[in-house]
Amino acid sequence: MPTIKKSVAMKSNTSKSVELKKPEIELGSEYCKVPNELLGTKLNPYLYGDNELFIRPFKTGEIRRISQITDDNSEELVNEVMSKVIKIKGDLTYNDIKSVDKLSLVFLCRTLTYPDPNFVINYTCDNEIEKEDKKDKKDKKVLCGASNKLHFDMEDVNIKYIKEDLGDKDFTFKTTKDITIKFRMPTIGDETLIEQHTDGMKHILKKEDKVLDEDILSIACIIEDINDEDLMKNIKGIYDYLNDLAPSDFIKLKSKFDKLHCGVDTIIKATCEECGGTVLVPVMFSSEFFLPEYND
């Protein structure tokens, strides 16, 4: 298990720190159990059953690989590398992990890989400050513009949690025509499913002189049941059904999805060393994020 001198605690609705504990199964000493409080779902039993997640730090080859991330290959690279560093005790696989938890797991793995605070990323303060104009001797507002260094740690990340009392009602919707739609929370596997269907659906719809709505396709891929069996035969049938829904029904259905939104915030609050103001620093997957500077 990686050496961690302090508890990994979150700014959440719990005041207790969260300890990274060694697993009780044979995974190797570098693995630690993922604390529920570090995931937006908190590994809710309704979503994960009694499965447990374990994670280890990146290896050099892995973090150099993921540091090659771009907008075009981000999903592929993240899944390729994260599927190697995560193990699950139970009957689930990496593809069964909820999509909303994936970013938290990347952040945690990054934190475990670089516990030394001398590993830093750079950011520029964009706060407005008052500065005296030498000509007219009056204060004017200007950008601070100071260069700062930040040590990334899960301790500084805010997490929005999903409701605890999840049940079938949260994943069921009844339309105005009394049709019951059942859906699931998107998984990493669903992300791949959506990607696989995108090109095929574009081709099919082009023949019908239609344009693919990728938001509707994303929802279609997580529909588990509609009480009209003919609709469930293929993704095209589900897509067409959703596309033809009354707008009021579609908005209500989408609002049910939105209520399940949870996960880590990608903005970290930092303090500028120059002006002392609070800076909102966006955390972006980049080469610098995965291969930070060592500020000895």
Image (spheres, helix red, strand yellow):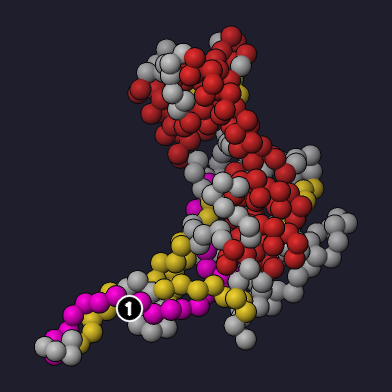
Q: Secondary structure at mark 1?
A: loop
* 143 magenta-colored: yes
Q: Which residues are magenta?
A: 137-162
Q: How many marks?
A: 1
Of residues 77 and 112, the one nearer the viewer is 77
Q: Residue 124, relative to residue 85: is it above or below?
A: below
Of residues 296 and 8, the one nearer the viewer is 296
Q: Residue 24, relative to residue 242: is it above or below?
A: below
Residue 6, position as x, y percentages in the image: 65, 75
The quadrant of the rendering that contains the N terminus is bottom right
Q: Which residue is mark 1?
A: 144
- Kind of residue at badge 1: Cys
Q: Is residue 228 visible?
A: yes
Q: Is residue 172 visible?
A: no
Residue 43, position as x, y percentages in the image: 65, 48
Q: Residue at x 57, y 28 (%)?
A: 199
Image check: 30 left or right of 142?
right
Image check: 173 left or right of 104?
left
Image check: 92 left or right of 187?
right
Specify few, some or many for label 1: CA neighbours under 10 Å numbering under 14, 14-19, or 20 or more. Answer: some
Residue 141, position as x, y percentages in the image: 21, 77
Residue 146, position as x, y percentages in the image: 39, 80
* 37 magenta-colored: no
Residue 61 falls in image quadrant: bottom right
Q: Residue at x 49, y 44 (%)?
A: 261
Q: Residue 175, relative to residue 46: is it above or below?
A: above
Q: Residue at x 63, y 68 (%)?
A: 291
Q: Residue at x 41, y 67 (%)?
A: 280
